[in-house]
């Protein structure tokens, strides 16, 4: 189904629900809200995990920082405490879909997240990656890597080489609040720059 067909079906269903409302003023207000809500629904992809995540309240998603263009998310991965994603808020597929200023803004945020990770967690290496093959919504992975992590020196999706001691992972996880504060401190001065 095309977006237009889906929007039409949604509009018909929702308007059918309000048919029994007698107050014409209320009915007009509700129909206006439906129309504007459906127009806005085209901005996010219904089947996109990142669009869904960004539409969820920040307290439930691990959002560490957000401006009007993008968000920095802490990924819930016990094997990689400090793994972050920098996610463009609009549904954009490729870096080259963004104007130069917005591309530069995104990369500036990625670099600041990397610096915060290096300051707080002191990893052996930081991996930066932008794939989007499974979720074609522009985002960067910023992953702290350690000599004792499960996959090092291979990519995080390779076969597991070792088991990181739970006490080490717990110690790294204990630094996540400090990491969040460091990211916010670095980025608050950049808010709105694009």
Image (spheres, rainbow, N blue to C red):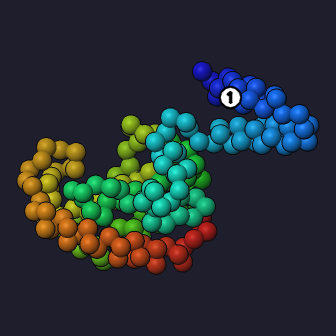
Q: Quadrant of the N terminus?
A: top right
- Left or right, residue 102 beside residue 40: left
Q: Position of residue 174 (x, y in %)?
A: 26, 72
Residue drawn at 13 percent across, 43 percent down: 159
| One can see residue 162 in this view | yes
Q: Quadrant of residue 118?
A: bottom left
Residue drawn at 38 percent across, 37 percent down: 133
Front residue of 14/150: it is 14
Front residue of 121/178: it is 178
- Left or right, residue 191 beside residue 121: right
Residue drawn at 78 percent across, 32 percent down: 18
Q: Position of residue 115 (x, y in %)?
A: 35, 72
Total number of numbered discs in the rendering: 1
| One can see residue 148 in this view | no
Q: Position of residue 155 (x, y in %)?
A: 21, 50
Where 167 falls versus 140 (above or below)?
A: below
Circle 1: element type: helix
Write down the residue under mark 1: 10
Q: Quadrant of the C terminus?
A: bottom right
Front residue of 171/86: it is 171
């Amino acid at each position: 189904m095309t977006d237009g067909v889906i929007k039409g079906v949604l509009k018909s269903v929702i308007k059918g629900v309000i048919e029994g409302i007698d107050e014409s003023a209320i009915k007009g207000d509700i129909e206006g809200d439906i129309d504007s809500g459906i127009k806005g629904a085209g901005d996010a992809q219904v089947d996109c995990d990142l669009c869904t995540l960004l539409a969820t309240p920040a307290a439930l998603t691990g959002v560490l920082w957000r401006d009007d263009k993008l968000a920095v998310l802490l990924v819930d991965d016990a094997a990689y405490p400090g793994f972050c994603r920098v996610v463009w808020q609009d549904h954009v597929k490729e870096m080259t879909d963004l104007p130069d200023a917005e591309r530069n803004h995104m990369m500036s945020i990625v670099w600041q997240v990397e610096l915060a990770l290096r300051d707080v967690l002191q990893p052996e290496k930081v991996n930066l990656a932008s794939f989007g093959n499974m979720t074609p919504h522009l985002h960067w992975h910023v992953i702290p890597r350690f000599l004792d992590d499960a996959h090092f020196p291979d990519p995080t999706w390779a076969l597991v080489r070792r088991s990181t001691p739970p006490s080490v992972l717990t110690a790294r996880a204990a630094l996540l609040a400090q990491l969040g504060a460091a990211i916010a401190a670095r980025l608050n001065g950049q808010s709105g720059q694009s």
